[in-house]
Amino acid sequence: MSTALKIWKKILPFAKNKFILTLLIFIIWILFFDRNNLIDRVKELSHLRQLENDKKYYIERIDKDSKRLEQLKTNNRNLEKFAREQYLMKKDNEDIFVIVEED
């Protein structure tokens, strides 16, 4: 009990000062109760970083797909290969055998 009393005696002069109390209330208000409080701000920054990473991924994916699409448009051999591999298309006199490798 004596340690708590010593701590209280050290805090009491600051607690009586109206400027320090006002500052403390202001800081608590900004950290927790304000519309743009610190906790929400940290969450929003984290979400923003995630969205920026997603944006980078999708830009890279669009570039990759655009190059692939251009290859398919310009080269009939690539188009035929893509159709056969992805959609299992075949000519009338052909049979398709799908080989699945197991690890």
Image (cartoon, rainbow, N blue to C red):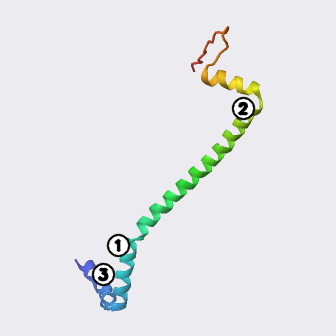
User: Given contact means CB atoms under 8 Å apart, are the residues at marks 3 and 2 in contact?
Assistant: no
CA–CA distance in space, label 1 to label 3: 28 Å
The C terminus sits in image quarter: top right
Q: Position of residue 58 (x, y in %)?
A: 60, 47
Which is more N-terminal, label 2 or label 1? 1
Q: Amino acid at mark 2?
A: Leu
The mark found on residue 33 in the picture is 1
CA–CA distance in space, label 1 to label 2: 57 Å
Frontmost residue, 49 versus 20: 49
Task: Give the mark toward the camera: 1 or 2.
Answer: 2
Q: What residue is shown at x 32% (from left), y 85% (from top)?
A: 11
Q: Position of residue 99 (x, y in %)?
A: 61, 15
Q: Position of residue 52 (x, y in %)?
A: 57, 55
The mark found on residue 17 in the picture is none
Q: Is residue 76 above or below residue 28?
A: above
The N terminus sits in image quarter: bottom left
Q: Position of residue 59 (x, y in %)?
A: 64, 48
Looking at the rendered structure, the secondary structure element under dot 1 is: helix
Residue wearing tag 2: 72
The mark found on residue 7 in the picture is 3
Mark 2 surroundings: few (<14), some (14-19) or many (≥20) residues within 10 A: some
Q: Amino acid at mark 3?
A: Ile
